[in-house]
Amino acid sequence: MANTTKNDDFDVKILRAIQNDGRISINDLSAQVGLSPTPVSRRIRILEDSGVITGYSANIDEAALGFDVSVFVSVQLDKQIDEALAHFEAAITDFPEVVECWLMTGNRDYLLRIATTGLQEFEQFLVGKLTKLNGVASIESSIPLRRVKTGMARIP
């Protein structure tokens, strides 16, 4: 459900604070945004119910887990029909190497971010899994040198 109400400055402060620290206590959050705990709790519930807050998670350092290499892969399918898209998307969800998948406009159908332990694992994924999917017409890979900016979501 999409949020149809206008968020005020307090909502924005709450969103920024919990995006920065999802484990912040209601008391600390209320002190930070300048409201008492009861209205802060009510606002969080409204933001959750309206679909602005979709869940809570931990930020994971992939490199600390041994996944040092990310590769962006553009995929073009041979047919852009519903059945081909659904088949590709179902297959991709089963590949743990694919951490993000976006349906795109333009001359490529999908953009994937692949996380691997190195180029050898990426090659195994590419040759052993991705190129073997029915309907994949072409693949283009790009290796990022460094992350310049990261964020979870844009907040007003």
Image (cartoon, rainbow, N blue to C red):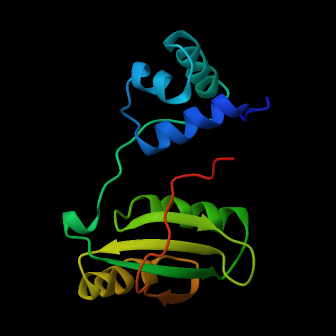
The extreme top residue here reads 38
- The x and y percentages for residue 105 are 74, 73
Residue 53 visible from this viewpoint: no
Instruction: Indicate left or right for 64 with 153 as reference.
Output: left
In percent of the image, x 64 and y 21: which residue is there? Answer: 46
* Residue nearest the viewer, comparing 81 with 55: 55
18 w.r.t. 31: above or below: below
121 w.r.t. 15: above or below: below
Instruction: Indicate left or right for 136 with 96 as reference.
Output: right
Residue 43 visible from this viewpoint: yes
- The x and y percentages for residue 87 are 56, 63
* Residue nearest the viewer, comparing 103 with 51: 51
**In the picture, residue 143 is in which quadrant?**
bottom left
* Residue nearest the viewer, comparing 130 with 30: 30
31 w.r.t. 141: above or below: above
Quadrant in which the N terminus appears: top right
Task: Count up the numbered dots.
Answer: 0
In percent of the image, x 58 and y 78: which residue is there? Answer: 135
In percent of the image, x 66 and y 63: which residue is there? Answer: 83
68 w.r.t. 16: above or below: below
- The x and y percentages for residue 54 are 55, 36
- The x and y percentages for residue 33 are 55, 28
